[in-house]
Image (cartoon, grey):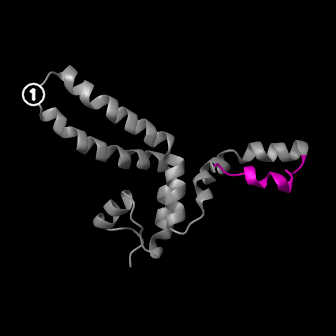
Amino acid sequence: MSSTPSLLQYIGYSYGRKLPASMRDWVANDLAGKGAVRRHMIRLAIPPFILLAPFWLIPASLYVHLEMTAPIYIWFVLMSLALNKIWRRHRLEVHGLDPNLVDTLKRERDAHIHEEYARRFGERPESAKWQSNSSPF
């Protein structure tokens, strides 16, 4: 089996289906690698666009079309952005991967801050481990 999904597998994966275990590396990179938020937002911006497109076929002015569709679409995109990390954590867990992978790039980017903290104040206590991830739960 290949390590990247076929077109049908990718479409199913984009909207909630689980990929085979042989594609876990690809899934980890897709959900936690560079550009993961952008890919997530593009995938989630397509369905409301398709659902709202027929409203533009109704004979009306541009103002009315925007009034009918823009608030729904903008709200959906904003909610997708607000919940993107939660959704990506869930998708990692569904595929049997560590949900904390979503923070990998941030940890790499901020490593110098943590090293400076440890140098100045010593290592963080073991009791602070629960605060090391971005899980809202």
Q: What x and y, as percent, mark residue 41? A: 41, 44
Please give the range of residues in magenta.
122-134
- Write the residue at 20% across / 23% down: 64
Q: Is residue 39 above or below residue 1?
A: above
Q: Mark 1 — residue?
A: 59
Q: Quadrant of residue 77?
A: top left
Q: What x and y, as percent, mark residue 20? A: 43, 74
Identity, as a three-letter code, of the amino acid under mark 1: Pro
Examine the structure image and report whether residue 97 is included in the region drawn in magenta: no
> In the image, 60: left or right of 41?
left
Q: Determine if residue 35 is in view.
A: no
Q: What x and y, as percent, mark residue 56? A: 16, 33
Q: Nearer the viewer, residue 30 or 50?
A: 50
- Write the residue at 30% across / 47% down: 47
Mark 1 nearby-residue class (10 Å; few <14, some 14–19, many ≥20): few
> In the image, 59: left or right of 16?
left
- Write the residue at 27% across / 41% down: 49
